[in-house]
Amino acid sequence: MTIVATAAALSLPISLCRSSKLNTKKGVRGGFRVVAVFREEGGLEKKSTWGQLFDVEDPRSKVPQCKGKFLDVYQALEVARYDLQYCDWRARQDVLTIMLLHEKVVEVLNPLARDYKSIGTMKKELAELQGELAQAHKQVHMSEARVATALDKLAYMEELVNDRLLQDRSSTASDQTSPSPSTSTQSLEVVQRRSPRKSLNVSGPVKPYHPRLKNFWYPVAFSNDLKEDTMIPIECFEEPWVVFRGKDGKPGCIQNTCAHRACPLHLGSVNKGRIQCPYHGWEYSTDGKCEKMPSTRLLNLKIKSLPCFEQEGMIWIWPGNDPPTATIPSLEPPPGFQIHAEIVMELPVEHGLLLDNLLDLAHAPFTHTSTFAKGWSVPSFVKFLTPASGLQGYWDPYPIDMEFRPPCMVISTIGISKPGKLEGQSTKQCATHLHQLHVCLPSSRQKTRLLYRMSLDFAPLLKYVPFVQYLWRHFAEQVLNEDLRLVVGQQERMLNGANIWNWPVSYDKLGVRYRLWRAAVDRGAKQLPYSEST
């Protein structure tokens, strides 16, 4: 689609041309060709260098006739291609019409015309031209609507093709007709109603977590927060755990419940690499073994522990029953970035809802109007571009790369010029960048432990400014609070039976893919979608 060419035509400096006479020539094959000709002062005619913009054949005669037939993938894309060609052709005619009318206005207002036209005649001609211009501008708006509808249809068809959802359906055979120019102005609602959609139903109370969702490495804390004499209590999949360092300095994760009287161990203290229960002083090592029982005989007793590992400044655990995998995914920022903030928050929302929110940027100009998206314009069309089988891609028109990394991580790189501003059409075109990591640990079915890491590839000395970490936390909480009031409301509706994924649209692609991945995990599918082996 050469919308760019149309936009270029709209911005051409028509007033700089010396002559005002524009001639058109009728074309062939049921349409018409347009040749822009300008008369120079010497009486010679010279073809305009940009007249070729209008030398485009009417594509309606070539539209595939598929009425009453099934459309396979290639036929559907071919129809969509001709539909876009028609929109381009129609837009060029709109531009040409306005140009011709403007030329007529110039002729009417030409000082030489005053010699043989009365003021009344000129006013009448201008009034008629004003009416024609109004009609032409109305036609331009109709063309804009056609383009938007065609792009919506194309984006939706791309989603169907990429996700292997486009298939023959006998029940809709009579409805699957060619989107000819006469149907280009149909509303998107009608097109979507006729097209088979992949249903998503995320409603009602959150179901118990499938054991398979536990068979992943989960980051639970930042290394800088775990000192030798400290411990970090966490919840993971509705079970209480406590993380601390053993005698060798390596982290361990054990059940946060004393075997004796079920006292929470995190209320105690860490003594020489062991957690001491505050109730009767029983002490546990990082493997869960009770190594000390004051005032009684030592028993061979052990509480539950989880595989625990430290890598790249993060503490990881494996809560599943299957043997842990040998490798842990890397969450380090790209080369050239320095970590400036590491923040942990406990949020009263189910982790899937929080992931839905983080994987969506289309809401930013409406939700984050007081923080990072303040002053952002609202694009006419937002897209997330991604491979056919992937959980990563980039946003258009925002210069932001984004990835969902199973089981609960969102990684994004944002091209910025200065805080709160965006520049360029892609991250590669931007001079400076903000890298973000969000880890949404499922604490319970209505609570999430969020780990947030922010890195920059500029202003390296900023991290040494006193108390700057409190400033970053303040900003992070401001942004999060703008989201929370909405997501908490979603959760209330969901628990009462509302489907929070009732009608996905094209910019929801990454969120939809996360939900399809999650649904496959929840039903225990042998092969997960969008995995490397798919």
Image (cartoon, rainbow, N blue to C red):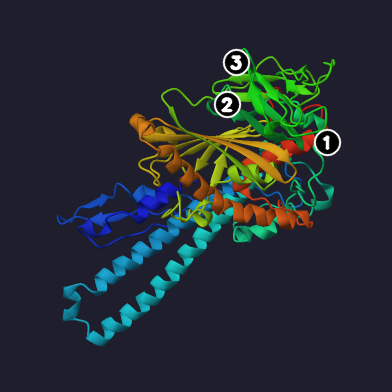
Q: Which label number is shown at residue 249?
A: 3
Q: Amino acid at mark 2?
A: Leu
Residue 54: in sight, yes or no?
Answer: no
Q: Dot 3 surroundings within 10 Å: few (below 14), some, or many (20 or more)? A: few
Q: Name which quarter of the figure residue 246 lies in.
A: top right
Image coordinates of residue 377 in percent, x first then y, are: 44, 55
Quadrant for residue 318, please give it: top right
Establish if 84 lies above or below 314.
below
**Which residue has dot 2 on it?**
226
First in residue order: circle 1 vs circle 3: 3
Residue 215 x, y percent position in the rendering: 75, 26
Q: Is residue 514 left or right of residue 230?
A: right
Q: Relative to 363, is 266 on the left or the right?
A: right
Q: Looking at numbered disc 1 in the image, what kind of residue is underneath it? A: Arg
163 left or right of 345 in image: right
Q: Give the amino acid at mark 3.
A: Gly
Of residues 114 and 250, the one nearer the viewer is 250
Q: Nearer the viewer, mark 2 or mark 1?
A: 2
- Secondary structure beneath dot 1 equals loop
The residue wearing badge 1 is 523
Compared to residue 74, the image places residue 156 above or below, namely below
Of the image marks 2 and 3, the number of the one nearer the N terminus: 2
Instruction: Tell me if mark 2 has few (under 14), some (14-19) or many (20+) residues whose alpha carbon lies within 10 angstroms of its own.
Output: some
For mark 2, give the secondary structure.
loop
